[in-house]
Amino acid sequence: MKALITGGAGFVGSHLAEALIERGDEVFVLDNLSTGSIENIERLKKSERFHYTIDSVLNEPVCAELIDRVDVVYHLAAAVGVKLIVESPVNTIETNVHGTEMVLKLANKKKKKVIIASTSEVYGKSTEVPFHEDSDLVMGPTSKGRWSYACSKAIDEFLALAYFKEKRLPVVIVRLFNTVGPRQTGRYGMVVPNFVKQALLGQKITVFGDGTQSRCFTYVSDVVGALVKLAQNDDAVGEVYNIGNDGEEISILDLAKRVKERTRSKSEIVLIPYDEAYEAGFEDMPRRVPDTSKLKKLIGYEPKVHLDEILDNVSAYFTSDKGRV
Ligand code: UDP
């Protein structure tokens, strides 16, 4: 197989590239390094089956040529991370909407299969956990910037499904739930790399709000395994799948304690009001738990890596040369 990964120098994209190279595929990466990094794909450069282009998905001739060369496109290029979204809303909306428009338009010319990475953010502030793929999406007002991310990804989903229904383009949509692991940067606010770094450096561990909000964390290799299987399964075409870990919901305060314990850190855990952490009137999701039964039924999905192992691996990454804490 030949695959194009947009955003392939990013956190999830680079792990996916590695997995595809390992199983013998030819991999093309298109990434503008806006949030990804060349170091993420450094060791892949040795493979003759690995190719990369530093450019934007919005560069039409470049994107078109790459799509022509492959059998499947994993569209992972996006602006992600709540902090980034709150700070650069124009860039978030434009990157997420125009990038997906471009990829779908070009893939449609040759009817190449596209896997579209979406996010659990699309469930918005729905409290009806666990979230099922057909659950309602509950958005906040447009005056609150954070919802622009969820809405931009929801538009991506609508557009991909429209291409499938109207033009028979084979698409698969995946909603990723708090994916974590080595190479994820804390720069865009993600909680696990932030807490682990803070703990390792003996800095204060910053819990936003009162810490009762909870999340389920999924290890990147479990996500990558599901992506590869979905891309190969014809029954996945035209469908939406949650990819997450439904077994280990944890409050953010307990996560801070767990990180402290696993890293044997002396860091103090502090509570920071949301207004200070993000912006005035910031709304967080109280709980975010996936219903993964649809994915389990199709590909026998079962997340293998549990929270303690995840935290140990992230901590090992930050203490290695590559992680540079
Ligand atoms: N969070 C936190 N401290 C941090 C970063 C994040 O308490 O330094 C919280 C954040 O407010 C949210 C949760 O951790 O409740 C998960 O945040 P993240 O940005 O990783 O992902 P989200 O679930 O918001 O997409």
Image (spheres, rainbow, N blue to C red):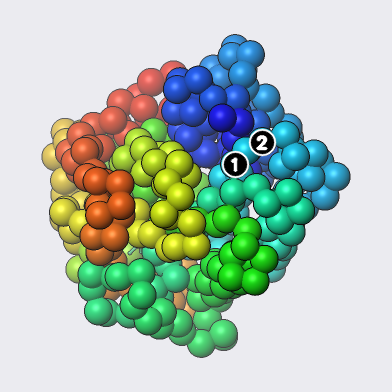
From the image, which quarter does the N terminus lie in?
A: top right
Indicate the secondary structure of the residue bearing disc 2. Answer: loop
Percent from the top left, x then y, of residue 103? 69, 53
Amino acid at dot 2: Val
**Taking the image as drawn, is residue 273 in sight?**
no
Kindly indicate whether the residue at mark 2 contacts the one at mark 1 (C-beta within 8 angstroms): yes
Please give the label number shown on residue 270.
Answer: none
Going 44% across and 62% down the picture, which residue do you hit?
239
Residue hosting label 1: 72
Furthest toward the right, the residue is: 61
Note whether 139 is above or below 291 in the view shown: below
How many residues crowd around disc 1 within 10 Å: few (fewer than 14), some, or many (20 or more)?
Answer: many
**Quadrant hosting ligand 1:** bottom left
Indicate the secondary structure of the residue bearing disc 1. Answer: strand
> Which is nearer the eye, 287 or 315?
287
Going 39% across and 41% down the picture, which residue do you hit?
229
Q: CA distance from mark 1 to mark 2?
A: 6 Å
Going 59% across and 65% down the picture, which residue do you hit?
164
Note whether 191 is above or below 212 in the view shown: above
Percent from the top left, x then y, of residue 227? 43, 44
Amino acid at dot 1: Val
**Is 32 situated left or right of 85 in this image?**
right
Note whether 74 is above or below 108 in the view shown: above
Residue hosting label 2: 70
